[in-house]
Image (spheres, rainbow, N blue to C red):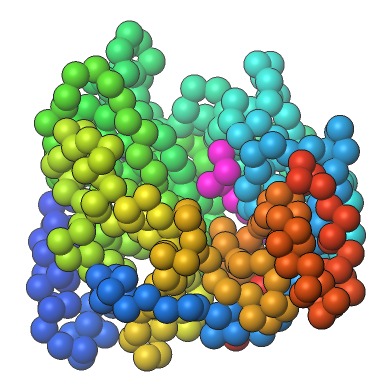
Amino acid sequence: MSQSKLISSGFPFLAVFIALFTFSSCSNEKEIETGLTTINLVEAYNNPALINMSDFASEIEYISLETSEETFYRWVRLNSTLGDSIILMKSSDRISLFDRKTGAYLRDIGYRGDDPEGFTNARTELGVNAKNKTVYAKGKRFDLYEYSLDEGLLINKIPGPKIEALEATLNSGSFTDVSLITSYGIIKDGLIAGYFMNMKGDEPYKLVVYDINGEILNLYPNYLSYEKQGISIRIEYTDFHNYNDGLFFKENFNDTVFNVGVDTLKPVLLYDLGEYSPPYAEQESMSIEQRKEYMFVRNTLQSPDFVFYNVSFKEKEAYGYYNRKTKEAKLSDPSTSNSKTGYTNDIDNFVSFYPTSINEAGEMMGLITAEEVYEWFQNNPDKIASLPENLQALQNIEPEDNPVIMIVKLK
C-alpha cells in the first residue's frame, strides 16, 4: 500500500471525528451512541475533595523490593505483573523480574548494549505480550526488540515501518526538521503503534500502525500545527495505555483520548478543560511560566467503572477519577500538598497511592519510594502501632532502598 493512499484514507476519519464531537454536545443518548465520554475537570478542580481509596478499592497488597548492589534501581517504573507470582520493573536501561510474594530479585530480561543482542532503551511505556510471554524494548534505529520472559533472551527483532520520512531522518544532520517516532504502544495480536512527535511544527504524520514485519497497516495524518521557534526541541509527554484488549493514546497538547485501531482512530474520552486547555498552536512559543496556567492531563487509566487520571496545574499535581456510573469527575485537593496529592489511603491508614498502570487481571498498580515510606514513619510515630504487622515491618526501610510496590484490588 502506497504512502499517498494511506494518507488520503485519513480524511474520511476527519469528517467522522468532527461529527463525533458535534453529536457529543447534544444529549446523553447521543453520547452513548458515539461512545465519547466528557470529563469536566474544571468543575472537579473548582470543587476539590479528599479522595479515599475505599471509593474504588477493596484491598491493598504491599511488596518491598529487594535492595542490593546488584538489584538497586535509581529511576524505575512499575510496568506490570505476570500472573500472581512475578512483578516486571523497567527503567530506561534495565528490565527486571521480582517475586511478587517476597519481593526477591529473580533475574534481568535482556540488557542494554551496543552489540546485536542489546537494546538501546527499555522504553517504560512498552509492556508485555501475555500471549507470547515476551516483553518489548527499543532496539537499533527504529526497530523494537522482543525478549522472552522465561529465558530473558532476544527472540525477535521487529523492524521499524518503512516510511521515507524516517529514512530521511537517519541521513539528516538536524533534529529540527525531521519525522521521528518517539513512543510506542502495543495493539492486541502484536501490532505496533508508533507516535510521531511534532518536532518541526508541521509534522504530516500522527501515528503509524504496523505489524511485526514492519509492514504498514495504516498511517494516520496529523492536522495540527504550530510555528517553529528556532532550533530548540521540547520533548512532550505522550500517553499510551491498554484497556479491554484495546490501545489508547493521548498527546500532551490535546484534550482527547483516542482508541487506536488498525482501521480507525476513535475519540473515546474528552477532558473538558475550558479556559485551561493548553493551546496546541502555542506549545513552543509559550514560556515555562505560561505553561503553569494550563492543565495537562497525564496517565489515563481505565477500568469498567472508573477512569483515573492525574492533572498537572500551577506547579502541582492532583490525582482523581471519573465514575462511569454517576458521570461525576473528582480531583484531589492540590492545596493539601507542596507538590502532588494522591489518593488518601483510608484502607490501611498508610501512605497515599499514586497509580501507574492496571494489569491484565484488572489490578491497579503503583509504587512508593523508600524515601516516602521512611518519611511517613518519621512523621507518624503515633500511628505505627495501629498498622498491620506487614506494614510495621517496613519501618526498617532505608531512604535509598528500592521502592515498595502497591497492588490494589478494584471494586
Instruction: Kindly tell me whether residue 28 is visible in this rendering.
Output: yes
Quadrant of residue 18 within the rendered picture: bottom left
Residue 92 covered by magenta stretch: no
Instruction: Kindly tell me whether residue 264 is visible in this rendering.
Output: no
Q: Is residue 159 left or right of residue 209?
A: right
Quadrant of residue 355 within the rendered picture: bottom right
Quadrant of residue 210 within the rendered picture: top left
Residue 128 covered by magenta stretch: yes
Q: Indicate the position of residue 291 as horizontal and vertical percent values.
A: 26, 44
**Foreground pick, 8 / 289:** 289
Q: Is residue 355 left or right of residue 68?
A: left
**Foreground pick, 185 / 105:** 105
Q: Please report the residue visible at 37 percent of the width from the left and 50 percent of the height from the top.
A: 315
Q: Quadrant of the N terminus?
A: top left
Assign the magenta stretch its main secondary structure: loop
Span highlighted in magenta in the image: 123-130
